[in-house]
């Protein structure tokens, strides 16, 4: 079966709750779709995500329990767990700075153009200002300062710890959608799930305290009964506004 176009893949993708037990999927193809996920848009190119591709049968059984026995996990041939790593912002910041310096030819700072200086300063100064916090206290202080500055000019206001968690999860969600559309394009099916014991999943995957589970995605080939109902969407006219 030929690979689908983007529009075809989007239309084909459904949240499949039951996968065929006799249809295996190629783990390398799934891995390629995860690679496509990493090409997703991401806030400030920070890439605060990790993807855990589960193919081991014993781990799959443990994940079924952690995901509350959902059929989309119980019948899945493989799983992909999308993990948010906001705690890695310092490491990702350094990676971006090193990339930019190499891109600029590893030349002395005094030779940087105005645009190049802005790019470097963005990661050296602005990113720490936004991401660094201490028990949420600094976040509220920054929020008040930025709110006051916002009285006089437009300014970025999402500077609290909770705001940055949302930013990181949004980026991870975009990556997850890339993955699912990629899977649909090669006629594989997925089911994104939030219903799970995230503490138990972190224990299964041996994740650090700072890691957060964004979603678990079941992977396989849809069973005839795997889609529970026809697709329902609010009328486009209710959600589309041209200004």
Image (cartoon, rainbow, N blue to C red):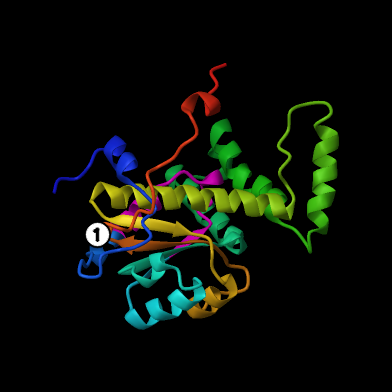
* Residue sitting at the far bottom: 58
Q: Relative to residue 226, is residue 152 depicted above or below?
A: above
Between residues 107 and 36, which one lies in front from this camera angle? 36
Q: Horizontally, is 156 left or right of 225 in the view?
A: right
Q: Horizontally, is 4 left or right of 72 in the view?
A: left
Between residues 152 and 195, which one lies in front from this camera angle? 195
Residue 53, image quadrant: bottom left
Q: Position of residue 20 (x, y in %)?
A: 25, 65
Q: Position of residue 185 (x, y in %)?
A: 26, 47
Instruction: Check the picture and name the quadrant holding the C terminus.
Output: top right
* Residue sitting at the far top: 243
Instruction: Report the residue at 34% width, 41% height from top.
Output: 10
Q: Relative to residue 148, is residue 162 depicted above or below?
A: below
Between residues 87 and 167, which one lies in front from this camera angle? 167
Identify the element where label 1 is drawn: helix
Q: Position of residue 54 (x, y in %)?
A: 37, 72
Whether residue 192 is visible to the viewer of this picture, yes or no, is yes
Q: Position of residue 37 (x, y in %)?
A: 39, 52
Between residues 60 and 129, which one lies in front from this camera angle? 60
Q: Which residues are magenta?
A: 31-51
Q: Is residue 32 magenta?
A: yes
Residue of label 1: 29
């Amino acid at each position: 079966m030929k690979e689908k176009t983007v529009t075809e893949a989007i239309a084909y993708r459904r949240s499949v709750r039951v996968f065929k037990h006799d249809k295996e999927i190629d783990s390398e193809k799934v891995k390629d779709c995860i690679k496509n996920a990493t090409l997703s848009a991401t806030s400030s190119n920070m890439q605060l995500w990790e993807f855990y591709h589960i193919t081991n049968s014993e781990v799959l059984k443990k994940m079924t329990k952690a995901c509350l026995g959902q059929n989309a996990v119980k019948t899945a041939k493989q799983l992909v767990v999308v993990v948010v790593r906001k705690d890695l912002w310092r490491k990702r910041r350094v990676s971006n700075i090193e990339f930019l310096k190499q891109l600029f030819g590893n030349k002395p700072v005094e030779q940087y153009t105005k645009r190049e200086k802005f790019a470097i300063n963005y990661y050296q100064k602005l990113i720490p200002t936004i991401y660094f916090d201490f028990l949420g206290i600094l976040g509220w202080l920054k929020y008040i300062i930025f709110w006051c500055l916002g009285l006089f000019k437009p300014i970025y206001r999402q500077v609290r710890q909770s705001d940055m968690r949302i930013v990181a999860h949004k980026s991870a969600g975009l990556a997850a959608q890339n993955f699912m559309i990629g899977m649909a394009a090669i006629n594989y099916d997925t089911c994104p799930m939030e219903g799970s014991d995230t503490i138990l999943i972190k224990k299964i995957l041996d994740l650090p305290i700072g890691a957060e589970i964004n979603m678990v995605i079941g992977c396989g080939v849809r069973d005839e009964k795997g889609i529970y109902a026809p697709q329902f969407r609010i009328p486009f006219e209710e959600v589309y506004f041209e200004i």
